Image (spheres, rainbow, N blue to C red):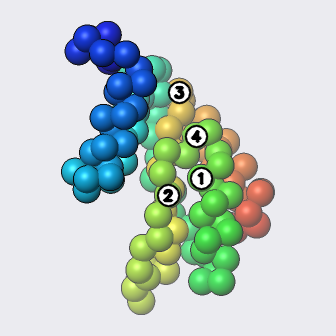
Amino acid sequence: MAARIGVDEAQILQMANAFIDDGLARRFAAVMHHRQAGFVANAMSVWQVPEDRIDEVGYQMAGFAAVSHCYQRPTYPDWPYNLFGMLHARTKDECEVAAHAIEDQTGIHE
């Protein structure tokens, strides 16, 4: 990116930090086009996690390579699931393997 606009990497970082310092941006992050990278299977996993374990389980889930993001959501009488995780893999079976690995590591099976 630096070469494209005719500056060096240090200048890019200085500009990014200035945008953050000035309140023009909150963060900068890379965006991967997962389908172009071969990750064509996706699954939204939903979990019923005790409130006192939400942070712990969320951090564990976020540590899995297959998980791009996870977040807490409110529950409802007919929807008890409060932690959602987005899984990406090359196949549906790999998504299922990742979900089972999350179950095994966290002990959450609902």
SS label for mark 2: strand
Query: What distance separates the C-alpha of mark 3 from that of mark 4?
Result: 10 Å
What type is the residue that disc 1 sits on? Ala
Which callout, 2 or 1, points at the residue further toward the start of the chain?
1
Query: Residue 103's x, y, as percent?
Result: 71, 59
Secondary-structure class at tag 4: loop
Above or below, comparing residue 19 to residue 6 in the picture: below
Q: Is residue 33 visible?
A: no
Q: What residue did someone put label 1 on?
A: 62
* Residue 19 rendering spot, x and y as whole percentages: 27, 45
- Name the residue nearer the viewer: 3 or 21: 21
Q: Looking at this view, is 101 or 15 the one in front?
A: 15
Residue at (42% x, 89% y) in the render = 77
Residue with the mark numbered 2: 70
Using the numbered discs, state the Cα–Cα distance from disc 1 to disc 3 in whole angstroms.
18 Å
Question: The residue tagged with tag 1: helix, strand or loop?
Answer: helix
Q: Quadrant where the C terminus lies?
A: bottom right
| Marks 1/4: CA–CA distance | 9 Å
> Amino acid type of disc 3?
Arg
Q: Nearer the viewer, mark 1 or mark 3?
A: 1
Work out whether residue 61 can be spotted. Answer: yes
Residue pointed to by mark 3: 90
Q: Are marks 3 and 4 in contact (CB under 8 Å)?
A: no
What secondary structure is marked by label 3?
Answer: loop
